[in-house]
Amino acid sequence: MNYRTESLKLLSRRLTCSDCGTEFGCDLSGNCWCAEETAKLPMPTTGGDCLCRDCLRAKAAAHVAT
């Protein structure tokens, strides 16, 4: 394994959605699925973490509906 591969591996992490508990991957190198989403929500300030794709879309739809 070379230095670049090892570095990219360190940028990837497994997360659990703070709303539903689904496990998903986060690629901090900029290739994360969330970068493709049109909805951008602020990061929670009370210790929460990222949301899975379904929860992000549901929260965005609820926000638009209000």
Image: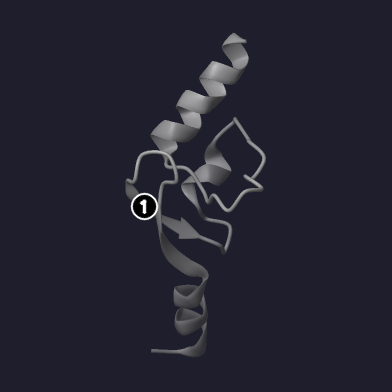
**Residue 1: x %, y % from top left:** 38, 89
Using the image as rendered, state which of residue 44 and residue 26 is in the foreground.
Answer: 44
**Residue 27: x %, y % from top left:** 49, 60
Report the amino acid beneath label 1. Answer: Phe
Tell me the residue at 57%/64% (across/down). Answer: 29
Figure coloring: one colour
Q: Residue furthest front?
A: 46
Compared with 65, 54 (above or below) is: below
Q: Residue furthest bottom?
A: 2
**Residue 45: x %, y % from top left:** 66, 48
SS for dot 1: strand
Q: Residue furthest left?
A: 22
Give the tally of numbered discs: 1
Compared with 19, 64 (above or below) is: above
Relative side of 46 to 24, left or right: right
Using the image as rendered, state which of residue 47 and residue 2 is in the foreground.
Answer: 47
Relative side of 45 to 3, left or right: right
Relative side of 17 to 23, left or right: right
**Residue 65: x %, y % from top left:** 58, 10
- Mark 1: give few (<14), some (14-19) or many (20+) Cα within 10 Å: some
Compared with 44, 56 (above or below) is: above
Considering the image in quadrants, where does the C terminus appear?
A: top right
Residue placed under numbered mark 1 in the picture:
24
Tell me the residue at 40%/32% (across/down). Answer: 54
Relative side of 9 to 40, left or right: left
